Amino acid sequence: MSVGELIGKTLAGLGVGHAFGLVGSGNFVVTNALRAAGVPFVATRHECGAAVMADAYARTSGQPAVLTLHQGCGLTNAMTGITEAAKSRTPLLVLAADTPGAAVTSNFRIDQDALVAAVGAVPERVHSPATAPTDVERAYRTAVHQRRTVVLNLPLDVQAAPAPEQPSRPPVPAPLPARPHPEAVTALAAALRAARRPVFVAGRGARHAAAELRELAEASGALLATSAVANGLFTGDPWSLGISGGFATPLAAELVAAADLVVAWGCSLTHWTTRHGRLVADDAVVAQVDLEVSALGARQRVDLGVVGDVRLTARDVLAELGSTAGTGYRTEEVRARIAERGRWRDVPFTDASTADRIDPRTLSVRLDDLLPAERVLAVDSGNFMGYPSAYLQVPDASGFCFTQSFQSVGLGLATAAGAALARPDRLPVAALGDGGAMMGVAELDTVARLRLPMVAVVYDDDAYGAEVHHFAGQDLGAVRYPDTDVAAVATGFGWVAHTVRTVSDLDVVTAWLAGPRDRPLLLDAKITDDGGSWWLAEAFR
């Protein structure tokens, strides 16, 4: 057995869930070793697509994923996806072939460690045949236990060397979740007792603690909201406001801004989540619960910081709180207002559809009615992105995959593919702009080849809409494009595809859903110009 084969076998034994990549000579052996050991592998058409699929799979499944790459250009092609994963603290292990130390003239040679570190990922390396098992295990532990994106560089000469004898190794123990300090628990319970209008805002770090947060919110009278990445965490709860921040409904923005206590649970309170701080009242008490000390107060002023696991903290605070809290924000008036205006689709609007262009709100509401409730939604970046995020409901936090930490256009289709593989029991829905659809076009082949029963909706305004509206009044020739027949492009890749201009054109969705769903469906929806979406106005404020 070679070291390359040993690496694949070792990772399979450690429990990685799925592998993605594009195979070249430098990662051929290690990829085949993963496959031979039973790790499912998806070959994509571009390395960036593979990186994003791996990221989305890990987020949606809760299992670590593997990305396998050729040296040099294979790694650079994947860097946008790796950057997104690193910024999102996705537990992802990247196996990157690397040139031998002596190959200083190789065309593939770059400083891979420096490149990886520059985007916030963790560079690791298999240093020698003798250290290979330990090096692989160290990289795996860092990825899984520290929730980091780790790039394990695999020099070709080390990969090709004979593997050392392997003594039996005990399984890698998982670290115990961090319990908050009792004094911090007492202080947070006291803040909840004193609050008349408490609001919980849950983020990515709270996705495992929905039940505990609901219970604590009920005991303390708090309303529930999420950051965009945790959308769906409180679906179905009558006290849920949905997303806080740029995608918030008018009612959600009003109620969050009026809170006298805001508790961020595993949420960094970015300017997106707080509308540049305007959703946090000047006199409101702000508490933040996070595993990382460095996260406390990093984006928003914090009056009370609690270091600890969200689930354990919520349980401990509930025990401390007992039955001493009041009704808080949970009055019958507030409940009635949430029931009446708690979703964007409940907010009246004037349909701006024309004979050949459909209003993106009308499109989104109709799709929400047509598509099964058990869905997993992935949203690309662009002016359009608020419509699917706000109007398409999701069943829970696992039903929404939002690769937006790097704000890169073009990741949506690959995101949907990775999420689809993680949740084959749900209908995958990819919401794309026309710019993102064209950027990610190569993975139309991957989705068709895998026969994923996906619905991709292209919100097509023939432009990079954010730039059109942000630079209004200037020469926009560089950001407007002639009408593209995206449906014809998708058909060429083997999709069922239709152009949508009116609500009646969406009847094709009903026919496709009836079966057999053996090919993915793409809808090229020609949407009206919205003059700049509401969330974009907030972003550029």
Image (cartoon, rainbow, N blue to C red):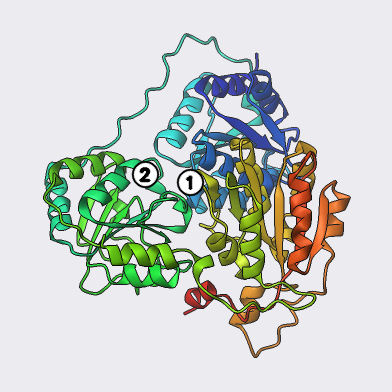
Q: Report the residue at 54% width, 55% height from top.
A: 393
Who is closer to the viewer here, 233 or 57? 233
Q: Earlier in the sequence, mark 1 or mark 2?
A: 2
**Which residue position holds label 1?**
396
Quadrant where the image shows the N terminus? top right
Position of residue 492 measured from the top left corner of the image (x, y, whole percent): 88, 51
Q: On screen, 433 above or below 466?
A: above
32 over 459 or under it: above or below? above
Label 2: which residue?
Answer: 210
Instruction: Pick whichever, 235 or 389, lies toward us.
Output: 235
Please tell me which residue is depicted at 55% across the width and 60% down the height of the picture.
Answer: 389
The amino acid type of the residue labelled 1 equals Asp
Residue 221: name its quadrant.
bottom left
Q: CA distance from mark 1 to mark 2?
A: 10 Å
Query: Is residue 114 visible to us here?
Result: no
Q: Is 371 positioned to the left or the right of 491 in the image?
A: left
